[in-house]
Amino acid sequence: MLAFIIRRLLQSLVVLLVMSLLVFVGVYAIGNPIDVLISPDADQIERAKVIVAFGLDKPLWLQYFIFLKNAAGGDLGRSFAYSTPALSLIFERMPATLELSSAAILLSVVLGLPLGLLAGLRPNGLVGKTIMAVSILGFSLPTFWVGLMLIMVFAVQLGWLPTSGRGETQLLFGVPVSFLSWDGLRHLLMPAFNLALFNIALVIRLTRSGAQEALMQDYVKFARAKGLRNSRIIGVHVLKNILIPIVTVVALQFGSVIAFSIVTETVFAWPGMGKLIIDSIRVLDRPVIVAYLLLIVTIFILINLVVDMLYSLLDPRVRLAESKG
């Protein structure tokens, strides 16, 4: 396992290096932040000073090598707009995004797993067909539209939940979180459900198909022949064997939820990384954009590594295959 982790870490470094080049060239070669950040009334001398201060007077290849040198020391540049380290800005907003993403993934599992099992156990019943019909909406409805409808119904019409913001936060190990206060929970509920809707539908379909396949296996038929209770058959023999694909998809979707929470954070004015990146794109704040994209790539790499390790815990055959290899 240790050799596997070291090998994956070395591969991850190569992936990060390639992605840094693609991201740097893609972001730095398009647009001119000086046109956005500098007043049109500024003279050429003022523009030249700002260009030199931002390091934009150097060739692109030299800017990239300077970026790599600084990145090796943990410095991904300073924000053009805020004049502070780009990573510091992102890390300030990260707890809000991680909390929202974690709540969305938790909702997708808590709601999707039992609903998918129910649909898989009763595929031809009214309940099963209704669940699958509703899951289609989870795939089809645009996130921004669902968010606006949630605000209109639960905030404007019913007045049950707040429209935007993060609400009251409490410190948990020095990190501000919303779920420890009632006001924070009320602010978290709508954006978390909005972000989780697609994943709820995905988990429902994965669980349903996995349950139907598992019910046809010989070990389930043998367990029934032994006279085991139906709840034990489902909880031990069915659920345990369908967890591997579900864990894989949910873990990978966690990275996607973090990366694509931009729309939800914008609709609900949630003060996370997604809202920061939208604001940075508007003013072409290149260091923040590059730092954000590289951070997302790093998160995906770490999630893939964790998924591979979870494989070996859930399925001993994975460990056996690795030892033979």
Image: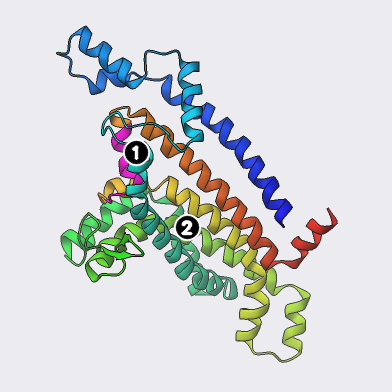
List the single residue furthest toward the left.
Answer: 41
Q: Which mark, residue 277? A: 1
Q: Element under label 1?
A: helix
Q: Give the magenta-colored segment's residue range.
A: 270-280
- In this rendering, the answer to whether 225 lies above or below 171 is below
- Please identify the residue farthest to the front as the structure is shown: 73
The type of residue carrying mark 2 is: Asn
Query: Is residue 192 shown left or right of residue 214?
Result: left
Does residue 225 appear to the left or right of 262 in the view shown?
A: right
- Tag 1: residue type? Ile
Task: Name the dominant secondary structure of the magenta segment.
Answer: helix
Residue 241 colored in magenta in the image: no
Does 116 appear above or below 166? below
Instruction: Give the quadrant of the N terminus.
Output: bottom right
Of all residues, the one furthest to the top in this rendering is 44
The residue carrying mark 2 is: 199
Residue 184: image quadrant is bottom left
